[in-house]
Image (cartoon, rainbow, N blue to C red):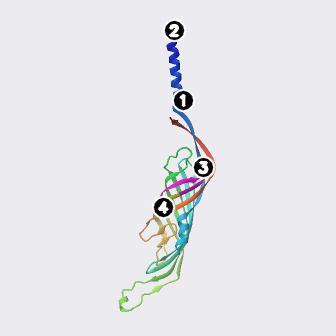
């Protein structure tokens, strides 16, 4: 009888130890998801305005988190760009807006809030072109005949639309401050051109010399304004 009681006691101790071990193996951890608005500025365009005399530009960026991994995103900007080529000098002035979404493919640990994302945008630009100087190609220049030039003509009411694929990174560096960069690949969809001229530079899309495709970069600093939070219970194996 004593052996049976000893066996039952040992079994209870063993089961108690296994139960305690199981409780240590699985623990609940609470992960907080913050939702809100992030606003910032493109440092590339801003700094370029200081070191490049023929360029002035400003772009404001923003996104709003609507789900765990999805963000509504938009950019709005203004550009004033003069292109000076050997036979052509023109100035483009205009504004643009891009809207779309980002998908965050990065799984953050606990309270981290970094983004590695891909997204899509649709861009619209309204602008004007001023033909400052244009030299007409002349096959008879060797005869001493001077080429004809035209200048001062302005084309207003121009517009363009395009689609963009975006890939980028946004990293939280301090409290609610983020720095990031993105690469953009653009495809021109519509392009209202002036008569007897072409839109060689489109605000928000950039140069169009090489056809309907273009690329762009931006470097941003932004501030996150939290609006509300959600909590998610996560099981962590030890």
Front residue of this view, candidates 65 and 16: 16
Precedes in sequence: disc 4 or disc 2: 2
Residue of label 1: 23
Q: Nearest to the eye among marks 4 and 3: give it.
A: 3
Dot 2: what SS? helix
Q: Nearest to the eye among marks 4 and 2: give it.
A: 2
Residue 14 numbered mark, or none:
none
Residue of label 4: 163
Mark 3, Cα crowd under 10 Å, few <14 / some 14-19 / many 20+, is: some
Front residue of this view, candidates 72 and 1: 1
Precedes in sequence: disc 1 or disc 4: 1
Precedes in sequence: disc 2 or disc 3: 2
Q: CA distance from mark 4 to mark 3?
A: 27 Å
Residue of label 2: 2
Write down the region rendered in magenta: 165-179
State yes or no: residue 123 in magenta: no
124 left or right of 229 in image: left
């Amino acid at each position: 009888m004593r052996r049976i009681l000893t066996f039952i006691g040992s079994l209870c101790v063993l089961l108690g130890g296994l139960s305690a071990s199981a409780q240590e193996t699985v623990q609940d951890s609470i992960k907080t998801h913050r939702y809100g608005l992030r606003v910032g500025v493109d440092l590339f365009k801003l700094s370029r305005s200081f070191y490049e005399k023929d360029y002035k530009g400003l772009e404001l960026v923003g996104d709003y988190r609507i789900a765990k991994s999805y963000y509504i995103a938009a950019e709005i900007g203004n550009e004033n760009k003069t292109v000076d080529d050997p036979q052509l000098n023109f100035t483009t002035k205009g504004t643009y807006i891009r809207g779309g979404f980002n998908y965050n493919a990065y799984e953050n640990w606990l309270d981290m809030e970094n983004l590695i994302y891909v997204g899509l945008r649709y861009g619209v630009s309204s602008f004007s072109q001023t033909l400052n100087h244009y030299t007409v190609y002349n096959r008879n220049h060797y005869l001493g005949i001077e080429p004809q030039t035209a200048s001062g003509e302005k084309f207003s009411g121009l517009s363009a639309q395009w689609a963009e694929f975006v890939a980028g990174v946004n990293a939280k560096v301090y409290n609610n401050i983020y720095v990031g960069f993105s690469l953009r690949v653009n495809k021109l969809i519509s392009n209202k051109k002036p008569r007897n001229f072409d839109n060689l530079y489109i605000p928000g899309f950039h140069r169009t010399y090489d056809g309907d495709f273009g690329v762009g970069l931006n470097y941003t600093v932004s501030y996150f304004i939290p609006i509300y939070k959600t909590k998610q219970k996560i099981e962590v194996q030890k």
